[in-house]
Image: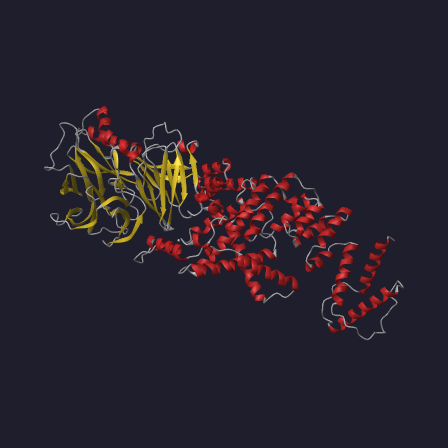
Amino acid sequence: MALRLVADFDLGKDVLPWLRAQRAVSEASGAGSGSADVLENDYESLRVLNVERNGNIIYTYKDDKGNVVFGLYDCQTRQNELLYTFEKDLQVFSCSVNSERTLLAASLVQSTKEGKRNELQPGSKCLTLLLEIHPVNNVKVLKAVDSYIWVQFLYPHVESHPLPENRLLLISEEKYIEQFRIHVAQEDGNRVVIKNSGHLPRDRIAEDFVWAQWDMSEQRLYYIDLKKSRSILKCIQFYADESYNLMFEVPLDISLSNSGFKLVNFGCDYHEDRDKFSKHLTLCVFTNHTGSLCVCYSPKCASWEQITYSVFYIHKGHSKTFTTSLENVGSHVTKGITFLNLDYYVAVYLPGHFFHLLNVQHPDLICHNLFLTGNNEMIDMLPHCPLQSLSGSLVLDCCSGKLYRALLSQSSLLQLLQNTRLDCEKMAALHCALYCGQGAQFLEGQWRHRADLNTNRVLSDFLKIIQWISENVSACHSFDLIQEFIIASSYWSVYSETSNMDKLLPHSSVLTWNTVLSFKGYWEKLNSNLEYVKYAKPHFHYNNSVVRREWHNLISEEKTGKRRSTAYVRNILDNAVKVISNLEARNLGPRLTPLLQEEDSHQRLLMGLMVSELKDHFLRHLQGVEKKKIEQMVLDYISKLLDLICHIVETSWRKHNLHSWVLHFNSRGSAAEFAVFHIMTRILEATNSLFLPLPPGFHTLHTILGVHCLPLHNLLHCIDSGVLLLTETAVIRLMKDLDNTEKNEKLKFSIIVRLPPLIGQKICRLWDHPMSSNIISRNHVTRLLQNYKKQPRNSMIDKSSFSVEFLPLNYFIEILTDIESSNQALYPFEGRDNVDAEFVEEAALKHTTMLLGL
């Protein structure tokens, strides 16, 4: 299934065995009574009450005497602790403990069973108590009213030492929220007591609200009040220094006037009428560390034939509303819609009907969302009970007493990627899978040598993605699969470095509110998102247009011999050396493919230019980040990009079982070589349109495979159209490996005439052939005559060396000899190129003889 729920806590496994052991010890000492049947009946009331910020879980049950017992499960030590026993037969529906476990707050209601009704106070239904538990001492009544009260201790972010004041929120069904400030004192060793328990200071935090949600992890209170029938979402942030601030007010385009009263994440809500659950609205707020803020809303449902829900992307300044028709409505829908916070994604699902995964960081691209219907087996494997989404991807199932950690399954997403026919689902599944593995970081050397099974599983899934892409490069018609993979994986490789990466780097190849104060942490990032939405233009992402222009300028200068200062070029090439070194340092294992093993100056220029431009881009927009860190981020990003290309080629190479003999020209191309040639051609197409660098050696390997696999006319067409780029390394291999048969001579000559002049002259000297001699002599004469000025004849030239009395040729050779003699006299220390007039004469005669058929 696309979503995996991994159990972090289970009442039946983590608490019940401990309670049985406690009962056994009690009975052995004669303090307890009752049979095993009584024991099981006692524990039918066992249920979770609350999950605190530190992850500790408070639960309750009734013993054989009907007393209410409070217990705590420590998620760090995996140990249970008995907190308090309240000797009354009351029903607990809200409970919270302070971080030091010295105070317990609980709201209880009178039992509805006949004969067991306890008198609390006249006219009161709910009793809210504050209990001292170290040691058990004082009990203070905070509220005795005829309405429900929920309690929640605040957990300061600074937990290294006990604070002298504890703060407790009371949330009333009468639509107000109060904060009690409780001063404690330590007496007689570890004895902790409440100071001035007769009068506890209190503050009114909010009132006249219809909905509220508690964020235990970040200590935030969200609530909605109605002003002239408008729904206004407000947020209060609580701090460790006992202060709190109203952070924002946002109007929402939803109607809550007739929706009643609802709370989210204030413990487990058991008092609600379960028969009416599916008719109630669902509303929740989700945030994550990147500064996103989403409000998910599903109104009351009059009919199950059609479901409507909305997501307000507050950090982006817009919202989306979705409507879906349900199939098989005849099967009674007993549960409401569920929203789950998965950090970078929000999951929306209705058990047995649909599952919708929304990308909240980039909601503008609807193709990054994944929608699965009830026909998909992934849906049926999800729980069919109401789930409560807590912070940090935690999910609480109050009915079963299980606490899950919700994770996206990379292997299931890979299966979906392989099986789905729709391009939009392929793109969504690919992005989700890369998010699960955090891009290609699992390919780095530090992951290769770890024995962690989970890491190895993720690594295996990631390699399977690469393999699938290499085998299905043409599977998508609306986008380039290789482009999308390279861009998305490279983005994820540096995403965690800073929260602004999504605004500076492209995340896809397929291509906006004010707050009152300045804050740090989450609020700073949220504000940054909003400012970006308000002021930034859509062209904020980095692209290689400047690199493209500058690279072409440098290549043109190289051809004309007028390249700019060597210091500038040296700096660019030094950048490329750093990228290659960074890449090799991260990949300690040997490569099968001969990549990164040659100079390839053109790719190194492109690589170095991209380092310079991307570094300037980050320096302009990443204010406050150290220059050294930015430089490393740039190197990591470009190294990752090159590494991904290497891995795609390597995966295809391994799959087709190619060996080093492919690098020679002494065999004809096989079907396996053609398959690798094809995938490399697709990589080249993908990177060319994005103008991304390729690993040095890529063009050499690509050309060698092309010579193996293509007929001559197809090969020359690929060279002329730029699909194949002739590198010096590839041509040297070709000249050395191929003999001088008529077919090979034609190939060699066709290659030589297409080489740049400088490389062509060098290659001709490696080919011992009259055609090569002809080219060398032509180039030599051209160079000599370029600056020739007629001089007085030198009568001292020895003509006896001329073996043929062909006057035009003799005169021409005489002129060349004269020029060479003059050059040698003027520049006696210049190196000669082993070409002289006699060689030119000989080459000319041979060429003439061949043309005349003599």
> Residue 186 placed where, x, y %?
16, 49
Quarter of the image where one finds residue 401: top left
760 or 112, which lies in front? 112
592 and 327: which is toward the camera: 327
Q: Position of residue 335 (x, y in %)?
A: 32, 33
Q: Residue 635 in the image: x percent, y percent?
A: 49, 55
Furthest residue toward front: 228
Figure check: 787 above or below 491: below
* Scheme of image coloration: secondary structure
In this view, 54 is above or below 556 = above
Q: Is residue 548 left or right of residue 192?
A: right
Q: Is residue 214 left or right of residue 448?
A: left
From this viewpoint, is residue 639 visible?
yes
Q: Position of residue 601 (x, y in %)?
A: 61, 57
Viewer-closest of 522 and 481:
481
Above or below 66: residue 135: below
- Image quadrant holding the N terminus, namely top left
Residue at the left extreme, as displayed: 122
Residue 1 in sight: no
Q: Residue at 37% of width from left, 29% of height from top?
A: 329
Residue at far right of view = 805
Residue at point 90%, 64% (across, down):
805
* Farthest-out residue, bottom: 792
